[in-house]
Amino acid sequence: MQTIEKVLLARNLTEACTEVVKNKGAGGIDRMSVGQLKPYLDLNREELCETIREGKYIPQPIRGKEISKRNGKTRLLGIPKLLSYYW
């Protein structure tokens, strides 16, 4: 099984979604809240996965968010606009 197929397995997407919620993740550039993520995936998972498999998925810009580190410095975290794609 290819890596992308492993990523697109329903259990892996569900686990990733659960981790984002558990870690109190921030919404991306599309401003979708973390609470909206699971319902969106439940409704659109197959279409999204098929779009990725067919090579039609076009990643969108990444939202940059500075996060604090333990040493008092910050680092830039990239948050992708995962759920928007074009035909």
Image (cartoon, rainbow, N blue to C red):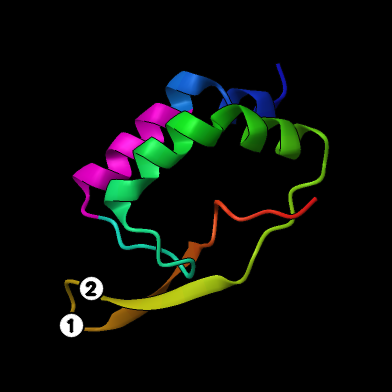
Asked where in the image residue 65 lies, by quadrant, the reply is bottom left
Q: Nearer the viewer, residue 67 or 51?
A: 51
Residue 56 image offset from top left, x and y in percent: 81, 46
Q: Is residue 52 above or below residue 26?
A: above
Q: Amino acid at mark 1?
A: Gly
Secondary element type, mark 1 = loop
Give the numbered dot on residue 63.
none
For this orientation, the residue located farthest to the top is: 1
Q: Is residue 1 above or below residue 47?
A: above
Q: Mark 1 and mark 2 in contact (Cβ < 8 Å)?
A: yes
Asked where in the image residue 16 lies, by quadrant, the reply is top left
Residue 74 image offset from top left, x and y in percent: 29, 81
Q: Is residue 47 left or right of residue 24?
A: right
Per the rendered image, the range of residues in magenta is: 13-24
Q: According to the image, label 2 marks what residue? A: 69
How many residues crowd mark 2 within 10 Å: few (<14), some (14–19), many (20+)?
A: few
Q: Nearer the viewer, residue 71 or 76?
A: 76
Q: According to the image, label 1 marks what residue? A: 72
Q: Amino acid at mark 2?
A: Lys
Q: Is residue 57 left or right of residue 79?
A: right
Q: Residue at x 55, y 70 (%)?
A: 62
Q: Is residue 70 left or right of residue 63?
A: left
Residue 83 image offset from top left, x and y in percent: 55, 51
Q: How many marks?
A: 2
